[in-house]
């Protein structure tokens, strides 16, 4: 499994966003996680395509956009045009996830399907063949800095087992919410390989060190 570290800029200092992203890039981050919130699917409002476009000019890292919005299909094109490399949307609000995934993949943009802690894992398992990534939320989405919900790890295990059974062992399984060196290792043992981390990186006082510590912790078995 290829381990990928995805710092979430939701916890970065926005007055110096470019510097923050360059810091984690230099420290070895693999992609930049961009949390898009609409004040409807989640009780918070964050950022949109203009921020993706600005980051496109700031970093060479792939831009991993996480749409926490009620009508993802309506906005895919705007995020792809802005330079997203990978777009994840939620199963709770998507009628036809396969159509959206196909639309993205035809444009060589990675497709991810996310599920909330209260959503049964069956809501994503049937769709595995059509997606590059499954995002298992390990907090209720909306805010950074919440505690990791270890009970979500059973879903990570189910997704990994199903992917292996389907011959899709190389699918990315992403965990998002409360990820730090300790909970990342628990998630990896359950089958995750992409680790989104907001607070533990950008609120740590030394984002570069935090990225390195996260990576080192994942070297353990
Ligand atoms: C939560 C977002 C996360 C968030 C994670 O709604 O989807 O990506 O930024 O932040 P931490 O790592 O602080 O829990
Ligand atoms: Zn996220």
Image: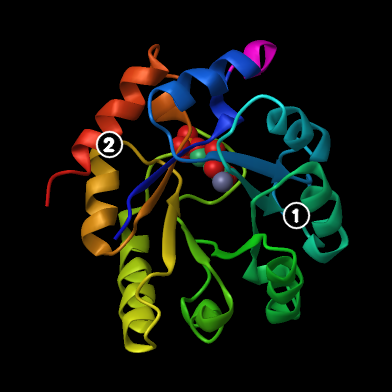
Q: Is residue 214 left or right of residue 54?
A: left
The N terminus lies in quadrant: bottom left
Q: Answer few, some or many: residues within 10 Å of disc 2's Cα (few below 14, many 20 plus, some between 14 and 19).
A: many
Disc 1/disc 2 C-alpha distance (Å): 30 Å
Q: Which residue is rendered at x = 29% and y = 45% of the image?
A: 184
Residue beneath the point at 39% across and 75% down: 159
**Residue 209 in sight from this viewpoint:** yes
- Dominant secondary structure of the magenta stretch? helix
Which region of the structure is painted magenta? Answer: 13-17
Instruction: Give the residue at mark 1.
Output: 69
Viewer-nearest residue: 146 or 156: 156
Q: Which residue is mark 2?
A: 215
**Place of residue 160 in the rendered image (x, y in percent of width and height, measured from the top left):** 34, 73
Label 1 with label 2: CB-CB less than 8 Å: no
Q: Quadrant of residue 34?
A: top right
Q: Secondary structure at mark 2?
A: helix
Image quadrant where residue 109 sits: bottom right
């Amino acid at each position: 499994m290829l381990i990928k570290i995805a710092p979430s800029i939701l916890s970065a200092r926005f007055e110096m966003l470019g510097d923050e992203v360059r810091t984690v890039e230099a420290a070895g981050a693999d992609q930049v996680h961009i949390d898009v919130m609409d004040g409807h699917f989640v009780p918070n409002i964050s950022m949109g395509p203009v921020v993706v476009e600005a980051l496109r000019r700031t970093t060479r890292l792939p831009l991993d956009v996480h749409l926490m919005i009620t009508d993802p299909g309506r906005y895919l094109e705007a995020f792809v045009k802005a330079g997203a490399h990978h777009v994840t949307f939620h199963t709770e609000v998507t009628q036809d996830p396969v159509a959206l995934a196909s639309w993205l993949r035809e444009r060589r943009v990675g497709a991810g399907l996310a599920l909330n802690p209260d959503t049964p894992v069956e809501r994503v398992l049937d769709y595995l063949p059509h997606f590059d990534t499954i995002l298992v939320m390990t907090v209720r989405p909306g805010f950074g800095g919440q505690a990791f919900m270890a009970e979500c790890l059973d879903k990570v295990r189910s997704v990994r087992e199903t992917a292996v059974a389907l011959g899709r062992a190389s699918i990315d399984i992403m965990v998002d919410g409360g990820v730090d060196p300790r909970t990342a290792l628990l998630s990896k043992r359950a089958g995750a390989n992409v680790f989104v981390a907001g607070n533990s990186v950008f609120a740590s006082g030394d984002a570069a060190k935090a990225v390195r510590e996260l990576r080192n912790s994942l070297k353990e078995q």
